[in-house]
Image (cartoon, helix red, strand yellow):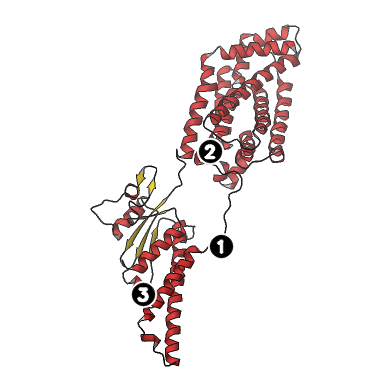
């Protein structure tokens, strides 16, 4: 054991004596983690809004009530130009967020151009005579323009349909009330149809029905499972384990070049001539790169700690995931190294494998956003199994039972690679 530790200390001293290794171990991982973390999170924890242009050609109370209902249905909608100056968001008022010229009113042509250019999520056109049509129970159509395909779900269209349903229900109730009064007038001597209070009574029924719709709770109650997280947490929750795993690959697979360098310089041959068992030499090399891999994880996860990332209710369970992944990468290093013939070839192989396995395994983006077949292919990379375990712990508050399958796969792959690498290991 003493010989193993002595060789390990020597190898670590040689590694840290090269300034370029510090660049890949500390500086680049920190910079990449911060960049990807802020890029994914968008740099803001404020809720997003959808800009929706509205051209109201009616301009009467019923059309304004439709817009009020639309706001109540979906508070994330910014109705331009009617919401200009009405909200505050990150120091910007709605005038700036609507991005409309104050001296040029919005028309249908301009709204269509904004939707086409992606400056607005949708355009709603309320036709002239909308209020009159509702009051006379005449069908009327609203024009809705969006870049979203009709079969695809569109939050703006769904919100508009809900608002229209609520307004139509209130109008229908008022129409039924008016019809009932006319029926009473026809069956009795009371001329309620022409009484001065009739119009006020029907309008009051409409107003109360619309108010009841506004106060009505949603039919579906949405609950976010697990701890609620801010937007930066979601960004760094992906970037911290992803960038850490990618740079662990670079660092540990870089051991292939180090082994080739030692073989070419005769260092391994001299170790073989010493009274040191082969198992001690192999153990020292494995311990060296296992130590470097865990140190790489510690550096990047310290960045996550500094930015306030919540590691979940069981942060200590991150350690066995890290250890299993580093062992898998170390085993892969020893399995491939004997097949290489030069230090340069080993360096190129380490970079190629590192980038390929990181991209396939979801180190740069969650695998959930790629097609199903790519998710299957991605799980040929050990990064995918590690990222699954990290996400279970960080995003979903998982425990031992949730990460044991991923750890089992990583350890099985490590055992297979170590078996092949130890069998093929040579001093010369």
Task: Residue 137: tell me if it is visible.
Answer: no
Residue 308, given in percent of the width and then of the height, sits at 53, 33
Task: Check disc 3 and report the residue beneath it.
Answer: 133
Query: Dividing the picture into quarters, in which one does residue 332 lie?
Result: top right
In the rendered image, the vertical position of residue 196 relative to residue 382, given as above or below:
below
Q: Quadrant of the C terminus?
A: top right
Q: Earlier in the sequence, mark 3 or mark 1?
A: 3
Between 33 and 255, which is closer to the camera in this rendering? 33
Sequence-wise, which precedes: disc 2 or disc 3?
3
Q: What distance separates the C-alpha of mark 2 from that of mark 3?
A: 50 Å
* Residue 281 place in picture, x, y as percent: 71, 14
What is the C-alpha distance between the residues marked 1 and 2?
A: 30 Å
Q: Nearer the viewer, mark 3 or mark 1?
A: 1
Q: Determine contact: label 3, label 1, CB under 8 Å.
A: no
Disc 1 secondary structure class: loop
Question: Which numbered marker is on residue 163?
Answer: none
Q: Which residue is mark 1?
A: 219
Question: Picture quarter containing residue 14?
Answer: top right
Label placed on residue 233:
2
The Cα–Cα distance between marks 3 and 1, rounded to whole angstroms, is 29 Å
Residue at 48% from the left image edge and 27% from the top image edge: 31
User: Of the residues under marks 1 and 2, which one precedes in the sequence?
Assistant: 1
Q: Residue at x 51, y 30 (%)?
A: 33
């Amino acid at each position: 054991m003493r010989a193993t530790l002595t060789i390990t200390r020597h190898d670590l001293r040689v590694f840290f004596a090269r300034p370029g290794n510090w660049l890949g171990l500390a500086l680049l991982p920190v910079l990449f983690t911060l960049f990807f973390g802020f890029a994914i999170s968008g740099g803001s924890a404020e809720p997003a809004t959808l800009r929706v242009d509205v051209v109201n050609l009616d301009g009467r109370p019923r059309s304004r009530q439709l817009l009020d209902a639309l706001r109540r249905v979906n508070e994330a909608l910014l109705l331009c130009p009617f919401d200009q100056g009405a909200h505050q968001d990150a120091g910007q008022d709605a005038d700036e967020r609507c991005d409309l010229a104050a001296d040029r009113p919005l028309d249908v042509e301009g709204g269509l151009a904004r939707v086409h250019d992606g400056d607005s999520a949708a355009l709603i056109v309320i036709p002239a005579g909308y209020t009159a049509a509702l009051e006379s129970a005449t069908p009327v159509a609203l024009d809705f323009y969006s870049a979203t395909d009709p079969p695809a779900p569109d939050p703006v269209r769904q919100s508009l349909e809900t608002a229209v349903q609520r307004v139509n229900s209130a109008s229908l109730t008022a129409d039924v009330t008016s019809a009932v009064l006319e029926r009473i007038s026809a069956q009795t001597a009371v001329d309620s149809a022409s009484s001065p209070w009739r119009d006020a009574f029907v309008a009051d029924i409409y107003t109360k029905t619309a108010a009841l719709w506004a106060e009505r709770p949603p039919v579906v109650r949405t609950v976010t499972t697990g701890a609620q997280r801010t937007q930066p947490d979601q960004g760094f929750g992906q970037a911290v384990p992803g960038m850490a795993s990618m740079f662990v690959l670079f660092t540990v697979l870089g051991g292939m070049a180090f082994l080739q360098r030692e073989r070419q310089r005769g260092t391994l041959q001299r170790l073989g001539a010493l009274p040191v068992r082969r198992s001690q030499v192999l153990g020292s090399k494995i311990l060296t790169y296992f130590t470097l891999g865990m140190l790489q994880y510690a550096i990047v996860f310290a960045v996550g700690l500094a930015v306030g990332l919540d590691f979940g209710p069981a942060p200590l369970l991150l350690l066995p995931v890290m250890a299993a992944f580093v062992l898998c990468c170390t085993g892969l290093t020893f399995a491939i190294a004997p097949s290489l013939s030069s230090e340069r070839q080993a360096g190129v192989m380490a970079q190629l494998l590192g980038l390929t396995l990181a991209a396939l395994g979801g180190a740069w983006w969650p695998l959930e956003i790629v097609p199903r077949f790519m998710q299957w292919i991605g799980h040929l990379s050990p990064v995918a199994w590690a990222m699954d375990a990290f996400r279970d712990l960080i995003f979903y508050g998982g425990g031992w039972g949730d990460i044991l399958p991923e750890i089992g796969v990583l350890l099985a792959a490590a055992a297979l690679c170590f078996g092949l690498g130890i069998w093929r290991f040579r001093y010369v």
